[in-house]
Image (cartoon, rainbow, N blue to C red):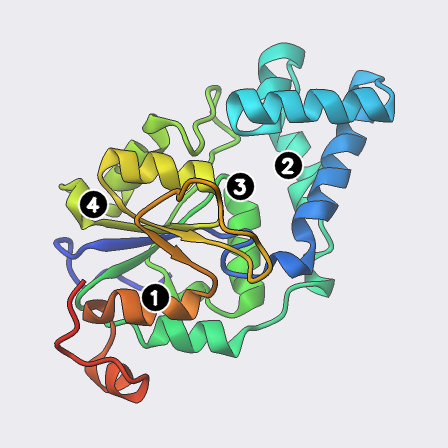
Amino acid sequence: MVQPVSSSRPVFFFDVDNCLYSRSKKVHDLMQDLIDDYFTSHLALSKEDAQMLHQKYYKEYGLAIEGLVRHHKVDPLEYNQKVDDALPLDDIITPDPVLRQLLEDVDRTKVKLWLFTNAHITHGKRVVRLLGVDDLFEGMTYCDYSQKRMICKPHKEMYEKAELEAGISSVEDCYFVDDSHLNCRHAQGRGWTAVHLLDPDDPDPATKAAKYQIRSLQELRHLFPQFFKNDTIAENGVSEGTKL
């Protein structure tokens, strides 16, 4: 992670999975299979019952693991080892020069780049390393599986944790992009400037999650030109006088 330039800058929070890389990588699908397998093997459930309980816990707590810990005394670090850390990411995720250029074009004297994920730290670090952008973020707020009480998006405490760890004093200085409709809705409700990232083939949601809705991270250049270096703004056809 790069060293902070100043503590008074706004912070742009980036979700990790299905945000920094495309959903077409199908990492989420592989993760769902591993979670279902974990439910099946550790709770002696049929595949159908495992899938139902998995979805029940996900809807109730935001993370399947939280339900496992609360009701079945599962070791969350062992779960992480068997699920997130077992994903064959080295075969799926490769360095992304386009993403790297986007992040390098951000003027970090004006804004701080920060990762914000519901995964444990090992998974978050692994993803950004494989993408080749791990040196461009100043920190990461993650769901800490080693804690007795796990906190994750979209719970209020998780946004508070992110603000504290990133050194934020006002919610007006929080910018956030995530592929989750629910996470963006809660962030905007808190006063953050939220950007909902949709897959190119996704239908528009019946109700927008946030003020901003995009289908590519590249659109951030045009939404927030004030955070990009002036020469890159000109190169991408955005006037320096553009206002939100």
Label 1–label 2 contact, CB within 8 A: no
> In the rendered view of the protein, which quadrant contains the C terminus?
bottom left
Q: Which residue is mark 1?
A: 220
Residue nearest the viewer, comparing 125 with 163: 163
Q: Which residue is mark 4?
A: 167
Find the distance from the CA under tag 3 to the CA under tag 1: 24 Å
Is label 1 in a helix, a strand or a loop? helix
Tell me if residue 86 can be seen. no
Tell me if residue 142 can be seen. yes
Find the distance from the CA under tag 1 to the CA under tag 2: 32 Å
Q: Amino acid at mark 4?
A: Gly
Q: Residue at x 42, y 40 (%)?
A: 207
- Tell us which disc is closer to us: 3 or 1: 1
Q: Residue at x 48, y 77 (%)?
A: 98
Q: Give the answer, above or below, for where 196 lies relative to 144.
A: below
Q: Which residue is mark 3?
A: 119
